[in-house]
Amino acid sequence: MFFFLFNENSFFYFISFIFLISSFLVIYSINPIHSILSLILLFCSSSVFLLFFNVEFLALMFIIIYVGAISVLFLFVIMMLNIKLIEVNDNLIKYLPISLFIFLIFVFDFYLIFSNTLLNILDYNKVIYIQWINLLFKKSNIESLGILLFTDFFFIFLLSSLILFVSMIGPIVLTLITEKKNKKQNIYEQINQKYNLNLQKNA
Amino acid sequence: MLKYFFISFIIFCLSFWGIFLTRKNFLIILMSIEMMLLSINLNFIIFSLILDDIIGQLFALFVLTVAAGESAVGLALLVIYYRIKGIISIDFISSLKG
């Protein structure tokens, strides 16, 4: 039934079709929950796209982080805010010129990059050589990533942990409501307590 | 090999249009930023495969970290804005400046 997927080109076009449909639905759907669901479809199909290239570790990471963390966070916020349906956007024409302008800037930028440098490299890759040294020393994807991550790039690894720390502290500070019933720690009061008044004797 | 690049470029442009077209909704803008980061990630990985260099995949891992942090902070800001204003439209977001 799905034999057409085993061809490389047809599989790629199938995946890119899903990409286009789901990314259109993210932008144009009226209900935010529909756009979240199509965002999940986009993430899952991109992970399939990566599995097709034998990038196993990053494909699984895409599913774990994007679908398991980010989309669930979006769904949770939508559930908490109880937003009504958004009205149909009427300013479609109003922002069209500036978006078209910036779009053209991006297209021009990519054209410059491709025409100068990268097309030469891409032409070389049309000839596929058998690289025997890869067959001799074969390492899995996660193994080679881990070797790089913990030796040469350990400082960037620490910096990314700092980013996660800031993004944990920031929402807590932003969304905390200070009231009297919140339990707070007063260190000065704790140190100055007299222990013989507060300790209880064992009977 | 060029077609693998173009699909992620098309996703990037669509999310860019999403930021400009759906200016009513703050949630859709955050989702479009997520889509932009996804397409950038795909670009990194595809070029790491083309150029036979694993540092692109390593960098995609860090972009993934930034995406998670960005969505958390952005949704916290959204919750604050909804608590103050009662709407999530960003037409009047310039009233937040001190």
Image: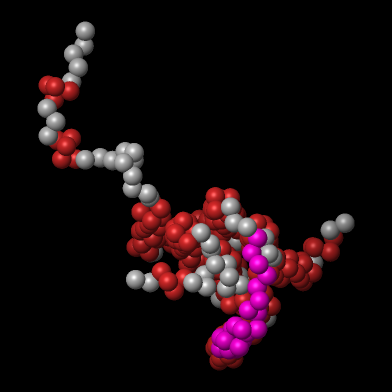
Give me the residue at 17% from left, 23% from top: A198
A32 and A153: which is toward the camera: A32
A134 and A182: which is toward the camera: A182
Residue A164 seen by the camera = no
Give me the residue at 60% from left, 61% from top: A55
Q: State which quadrant residue A149 falls in.
A: bottom left
Give me the residue at 41% from left, 69% from top: B96
Give the colour scheme shown: secondary structure
Residue A179, relative to residue A171: is it above or below? above
Residue A179, relative to residue A39: is it above or below? above
B79 and A11: which is toward the camera: B79
Q: Viewed as shown, does residue A193 lie left or right of A78?
A: left
Q: Is residue A90 magenta?
A: yes
Residue A134 at x, y percent in the picture? 58, 65
Residue A62 at x, y percent in the picture? 58, 58
Residue A59 at x, y percent in the picture? 60, 58
A160 and A50: which is toward the camera: A160
Q: Viewed as shown, does residue A55 lie left or right of B93?
A: right
Residue found at the very far top of the displayed protein: A203
Q: State which quadrant residue A138 falls in.
A: bottom right
Quarter the C terminus of chain B occupies: bottom left
Give me the residue at 53% from left, 62% from top: B87
Quarter the N terminus of chain B occupies: bottom right
Q: State which quadrant residue A26 falls in.
A: bottom right
Residue A99 at x, y percent in the picture? 59, 84
Residue B67 seen by the camera = yes
**Magenta part of the protein: which range?**
A85-105
Residue A72, relative to residue B12: is it above or below? above
